[in-house]
Image: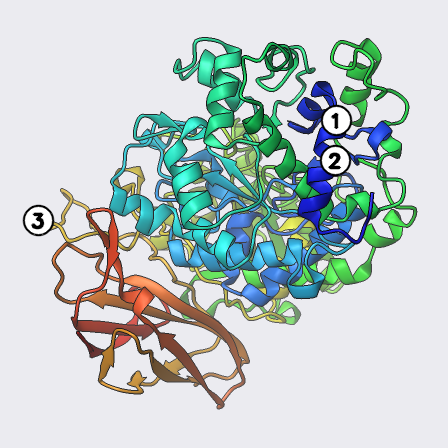
Amino acid sequence: MDKNLPIEERVKDLLPLMTMEEKILQLASFYPNGVERLGIPNLQPGECLHGVAAEEATSFPQAIALGSTWDTDLIEKVATVIAREARALGIHHCYTPMLGVTRDCRWGRTEESYGEDAYLVSKIGEAFINGLQGKGDDRFSKDRIIATAKHYVADAEPLSGNNGAAVEISDRALHEVHLPPFKVAVEQAKVGSIMPAHHSLNGVPCHANNYILKDVLRKDYGFDGVIVSDNGDIRMLHTTMKVAKDLNDAAVMALEAGVDSELAWMCPMGENRGYGTLFAEACKKGDIDMALVDQAVANVLTAKFRIGLFDEEGSTAVQEDFLDMQGVFNSDEHIHYADTKRSFGIKRDNYKEILYSEAHNKVALEAAHKSIILLKNDANLLPLDPSKLNRIAVLGPNANTKILGGYSTSKPRYFVTILDGIKEYVGDDTEIVHAEGCTPTDFIEQDIDKAVDLAKASDVVILAVGGNELTCKENEDVDTLDLVGDQQQLIEAVYETGTPVVLILLHGRPNSIGWAADNIPAILEGWYLGQECGHAIASTIFGDLNPGGKLPITVPRNVGQVPAFYNKLPFGRQQKYYKSSPEPLYPFGYGLSYTTFAMSEPKLSAKTMKQSETLTVSVNVTNTGKMTGEEVVQLYLHDDLCSVTRPSKELKGFKRVKVEPGKSIQVTFEINEEMLSFRNQGKWMVEPGQFTVMVGNSSTHYKETSFILEA
């Protein structure tokens, strides 16, 4: 085949040479799909949510923690490392990023998201995709992979917080809240793959939804990549959703909607696959429109060409033993081969050199540092001075435990616990004592007693609580946000000793920590910080690092406030709860620092703006404290008078800046027409009038100005 021909022509030339089985094999994901006879390479997928889910791969902070950095340059750097390690391990296509706008933190997949705001999720997601795939001439080069934007669409606002629950939302909410991250992923980052969601959307399963997959994704956004099903979801059209009469009917529905590739983990081609043996037989009988099949095959082949697999030496070697296409779908040898080779392709000879890169470890440490959020610091308890501490008690179920979050490597090269990080930091100069106190799910009274005794005899307590991979994950939703097990009793018992307490939260979703917020003097939010957890925490509590992360999601007082997202529509009556505050415990965008910042009044480049124009708003950020720190400057907009109700404010820009003591830096944002638009009666529109501009360091702390949009 002529390598100089355009990809479209190479695909067109290849299709007539393929047998029916060879074509159907292209539609199988997580299944050897190369054809040695024709030199068609295997496209090997994998999981790369916050690092490749493979032994020895670098483990970065979980997605919710990456969202807390509000640092798109860092996110792109993280994803670049992930892509390099994936290719070293023989992986070409990763099922990430997850672009759900999480409006219900009861949902177990909250940890996989970048937060509750469409703009924040869009920008973090765009940066992650750019890191995985590359940009410009570097796009899909030898150290890049195909990214998958998922789960399309609106999976992060499930009924009762239940994963996969039916979603019924308006056209406005769909297009203003849940679709924007995917629009940016397609139009700006040129994402190579999309994965539909498990659920039904307004009565139509996402995997058979022509509106979102064809009309919006393909036609409106111009997506030209591969649509890959989520695990088993083509089959589910028949077995669970009950919209297809049998497996073949389900396959046809998915194919007609534009699903090119089927992920059906651990399913041989003849069992429970939509695009499998039965489907191939139906195609041979003429029961299936072959134009649809050929288009799907062409999309998969195009992806293989784009990522350079056809021109990569040895790309079909993984298939040579068994893929002779002789009875391939029913071969016991082939099934065994698929089971053993499903997860990884051919590793590069130097893969260990790549995975064990010290530069990669440094990126993981930087990401962990920048993910940490300071929620409370009464009387400037933090940072601690270890030279003034004779004994430190490191307590709690998460103080000496390896916790990475969902879709993680089971065996990272190393993991630094909080206990290990603190011991390494202080050395032999300070005594470190440790007790677990309790576990997240079991109560052992004598362990709490031991923790209390150690706390009494120490100068300060570092208390690490939260959750783990058992309490928050896919299909592990909750009906309470309280700390699981007897962690609350542990916190209160340790507090009663009178020893100062620094509370560290490591978990996958916000917890109700109202008592701690009222009583514990210092609180750090860490989510899951990856392999460098202990180093990052130690550097923070002892002041080598000044925390600068911000909340990507609102922390509610209790589960009764859920959904608690910040940008709600106006209420028809006063918002109040009986004997409780309607305000969240900690608002979206919130995060403290060891230093202090002052922000000037926002200045507009003009007080009026025409719809075809742009204007800018600028503020000066001054570090008025004694320590270098980083502040996240946030831009919010509000339409003051509109023909439909609008959110109280909407994030439209942010920038994380580093400022030295006594120094100032100017931050400027551009405001354009698209930022002012809204959805009404199935169309996007902009109305002239006054808009309020809010610039600050959280969704509740800002300074205002306004401008007039002219007709």
Ranked by sequence position, the earlier of labels 3 and 2 is 2
Q: Tell me if residue 199 comes above or below residue 178 in the rendering.
A: above
Q: Tell me if residue 599 comes above or below residue 634 in the rendering.
A: below
Task: Count numbered badges in the picture.
Answer: 3
Residue at image position (64%, 27%) is 27
Q: Which of 357 and 449 is in front in this view?
A: 357
Q: How far apart are marks 3 and 2 (CA)?
A: 61 Å
**Which secondary structure, mark 3?**
loop
From the image, tell me which residue sits under label 1.
18
> Tag on residue 541?
none
From the image, tell me which residue sits under label 2.
14
Residue at image position (59%, 54%) is 129
Residue 473 place in picture, x, y as percent: 52, 33
**Which secondary structure, mark 1?**
loop
Residue 536 place in picture, x, y as percent: 64, 60
What amino acid does circle 1 point to? Met
Q: Distance between the residues labelled 3 and 1?
A: 62 Å
What amino acid does circle 3 point to? Gly
What amino acid does circle 2 point to? Leu
Residue 275 place in picture, x, y as percent: 60, 20
Contact between marks 1 and 2 (CB within 8 A): the answer is yes
User: Quarter holding the C terminus?
Assistant: bottom left
Q: Is residue 111 visible?
A: yes
Query: Badge 3 local density, few (<14 within 10 Å), some, or many (20+)?
Result: few
* 533 horizontally vs 357: left or right: left
Q: How far apart are marks 1 and 2 (CA)?
A: 7 Å
Residue 702 place in picture, x, y as percent: 29, 73
Query: Badge 1 local density, few (<14 within 10 Å), some, or many (20+)?
Result: some
**Which secondary structure, mark 2?**
helix
User: Quarter holding the N terminus?
Assistant: top right
* 450 horizontally vs 409: left or right: left
From the image, tell me which residue sits under label 3.
572
